[in-house]
Amino acid sequence: MTEADQQAYLSIRNLTKRFGTFTALKNVSFDIHEGEFVCFLGPSGCGKTTLLRAIAGLDIQSEGSVIQAGRDISALPPTERDFGIVFQSYALFPNLTIIKNVAYGLENQKLPADQIRARVQELLNLVGLPEQGAKYPAQLSGGQQQRVALARALATSPGLLLLDEPLSALDAKVRVHLRHEVKALQERLGVTTIMVTHDQEEALAMADRIVVMDHGIIEQIGTPQEIYRRPASLFVADFIGEINRFQGVATDVGKVRIGDLELTSPRSTLATDTPCVVAVRPEDMVLSEPGGETPVNGFNAVISELEFLGVTWKVLLDSPVFGDSGLTANVSVNRARQMNLEQGKNLSVQFVAEHLHVFSMPQAS
Amino acid sequence: MTASTDTATAAATKVRPKLGRDDWLMRMFMAVIGVYLLVTLAFPLYTMLSKSLSTFSVDLTQFAFQVDSGDGWGPELTAAELAALLPEPPYSAAEISGGSDTRLSPVDLFPDFNFRSPTRYRIRNVSEGGAFLFGSERVSDTEWHEYVSNDFRRVTMRPRATTGLDNYKGYFSTPSLFYSIYNSLTIAAISTVITVTIAFGLAYALTRSCMPFKGVVRMIAMIPILVPSLLPGIALVYLFGNQGVLKELLFGHSIYGPIGIVIGSVFFTLPHAFIIIQTALSISDARLYEASESLRASKWRTFRVVTLPAARFGLISAAFVVFNLVITDFGLPKVIGGQYNVLAVDIYKQVIGQQNFEMGAVVSVILLVPALVAFTVDRIVQRRQVSVLTARSVAYEPKPNRRFDTLCLIYCGLIAVFIVGLLGMCQYAALVKFWPYDLSLSLSNYNFDRMDGGGWDSYWNSIELGLWTAAIGTCVIFSGGYLVEKMQGFTAGRNAFHMIAMMPMAIPGMVLGLAYIFFFNDPGNPLNGIYGTMAILVICTVTHFYTVGHLTSLTALKQMDREFESVSASLKQPVWRLFARVTVPVCLPAVLDVSVYMFVNAMTTVSAVIFLYSPDTTLASVAVLNMDDAGDIAPAAAMGMMIFYTNAVARLIHLALSNGVLKRTQAWRYR
């Protein structure tokens, strides 16, 4: 029992996909557990959609295996796999009513007609469109169409739900609203779900775990907090959220230097004299009035520019320590009022040691 | 055992996708249609090409003779040696290499031959491979065969087949034949320039002016598509022929010849050019006109700098389409060409008139060259045309301009008079009792059963051909298009299939028809049985008009969401279910377009089927030609008009279906 629980629902092993000479996926492996909501996140062309289509059997991988619920489905055509899928374009059949669209997958299962009707109504209730069944897709809004697509994909109660950028074609407001609904629906049904997206906010808001990809490899797998707080690579740090980057060098384990500034960074494991990149998020620094003794990881800076962003101020700082490249800090509106921030003001800045990220210098490619 | 385990662990295992039921189904279906296209297109063309390279000539050194005039056998002499003894050559060069049916009588080698004399003759083949006939019995061994003089006259020497370019040499050394190349190119070029100019004016008037009656003009401009290309020829005979009502307008020139062909060609190619140019003009971007206007450019400058460049590809494409149509057309020059020989008619004359199939094949290959060039250029241009359109283009809305609109209306009116006039002349002539002496009206010319050409049966045969072609053609073409567009993987097969499907557009009808004779009339061909039946006419017509239907299907299918197949597969539905429930219903307008296109063309086509009909399967369009040939011009006009009315009805039904029934099945289109 417990062993079965711990076993992965979906296992991807050494997946490689080549299109001619181009390698879209390079030896990708990971596990997804039952009931999990996983996001594939990355810039366009990173291989996330290729990975999804390999799992669906729509574009079967060149090498490697896919195991779903203990069954090796690596080479099976999509019809012999167990999944439902929703596309960015909805792909609703335009000549069929909403009811017929949702019932499409139920039709050759030898179910009695009234049972199909009941199931379709149940699904339409589930996605919040109980009254729209007689309409055609073109008569619905984009958000409604995507709900119908979701209902259709769930109709056969698949073990795995695949969402290929399902919200990208929608307006910003609808998108945020549907984000919550999809997440709530997934939690209620407990269906294992994979969503492909290039929108980091969407991934952070919805996923139990995020698979960050770039150039056909997995950069990091983790919960949204882990990905944001503990980026495993410079790419992840850069791609998700904003971050300040400086070139430096490791002076000892847990110590780095940027120019003349010596910094303590408990999480750095780089050996002495290793060139590195030091990164810090705009919200991970403490601004205070100048004067007094310089704190650990502290230095002086002057405000070069202020940008109002609504809930926060974006503060652009200049410091002799960093030469020409300035840095950015985010300060809450309250704090900014308290400190009376304005252009040209001198400040003392402190990097929070445990939030300092140190990466070895990326190889020039 | 250990070795294989080692390699398995060393390298990642290659995945060989398992083909699902749908994949097998689609591949099998594609193979079936692929084989169909190979058998109905590639194989016949190949047979024809090899025919054009095979020559038949009687090798006089292959036959040896001995004569016994009562005093024992004389010396053994070959036919060549005997011929050399004669003061004049007994056979002309044309007789010796006349074709596969050549039969030379050896009697001509013996000037003192008399079938009553007691002289005995011996003949043998000098080597294996030669043959002579005794009566109809073929003798190919190398033994002596002895005949009394009365029997000897029944011996004929047969030609041997060799492969080479002799047919082409023969063609190019016969001025009456190769002048046709010049003639064909000339009339095609002239017709192209005139048609494209007129069509451009027409399209310009309809897209850039606010003139009234645009719908009527558009409809009239489409009429020529509904009639066989030889019908304008018949009308021209009545208008400008020897007994024509407007004969004086030609100032002594004869309508029979290039003038007639060009006028008729302009008539029947106008709608083709018009459709292409109109499309090109209507995708022009209004923003460019606004920019030009705000820069205070003159109208003429705007025309040169904005209008013409935007329509450039359309004009080029239209020019090649028209050129191709004219150079491959057979019906019109047959009716009104007179002594002016063109390539398409030469094929007919060689095959039907002189039974010289090899030379017919040579002319066909020559006719293929300009057609292939025109086709290739057109395809390249069409591909570039796509990039002209951008998503942000704004449709051009013409503003009323009294003088310009009136001018446009007059121009369109003249074209409408030209089209309706020719057609009306035909209808009038068909109803007149005895042109030009008794102009009272009667229906006697519709008594087709009293004329050559197959009578009313040929009309019903044509309808049958049209319906079969529409039904079978639409199924095959649309399914084929679906496989090319929507099948997963198997890219090489799909590309090859698409290429074969594009070929028929480049193949002139005469060439296809002749190729069918060579291929299907061969007794060794297992499909020989369909020769002379309705089936071969249907197959030929479907293949002849395959490409346009294929392209129409692809255009419609490309607009379908690429993920329908994926969604359907994820819901574990077989692909044919998606095809029947979604693909076909959504593409129904295109499917109907293809079927009416097939029907109309099956009704009007002459070129391919002229070689393939049998006494049981005469066709209306062919009957028009044959009645005209036999001098029954009025009944020919009457039959031509029957084709027009039938096609007009087909078009109306198509319209009604598209607007009426479709409104119900396509309810999803309307919000």
Image: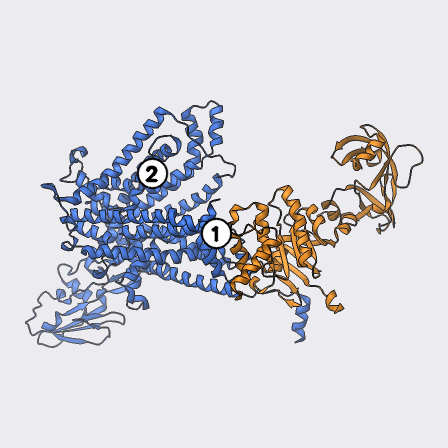
Q: Which chain carries label 2?
A: B
Q: Among all residues in the image, which is located at the extreme top?
A: B296
Which chain gets the orange colouring?
Answer: A
Instruction: Determine the secondary structure under disc 2.
Output: helix
Give the total of numbered labels: 2
Q: Tell me the mark number nearer the camera, choosing from 2 and 1.
A: 1
Q: Mark 1 points at which residue?
A: A95
User: Relative to B244, does residue B120 appear above or below in the rendering?
Assistant: below
Q: A28 or B442: which is nearer to us?
A: B442
- In the displayed structure, does residue B650 sit left or right of residue B451? right
Crowding at mark 1 (Cα within 10 Å: few <14, some 14-19, many 20+): many
- Chain B: colour as depicted: blue
- In the displayed structure, does residue A350 sit left or right of residue A107? right
Q: Can residue A110 be seen in this view?
A: yes
- In the displayed structure, does residue B135 sit left or right of residue B545? left
Q: Which chain carries label 1?
A: A
Question: Label 1 is placed on what type of residue?
Answer: Asn
Residue B612 appears at what percent x and percent y? 26, 59
User: Contact (CB < 8 A) between labels 2 and 1?
Assistant: no
Residue A123 appears at what percent x and percent y? 59, 56
Which image quadrant: the N terminus of chain B?
A: bottom right
Rendered residue at 31%/33% (across/down): B412
User: Relative to A299, does residue B178 appear above or below in the rendering?
Assistant: below
State the mark number for residue B31. Answer: none
State the mark number for residue B218. Answer: 2
Question: Label 2 is placed on what type of residue?
Answer: Arg
Instruction: Determine the secondary structure under disc 1.
Output: loop
Co-location on one chain, circles 2 and 1: no
Q: Among all residues in the image, which is located at the extreme left?
A: B116
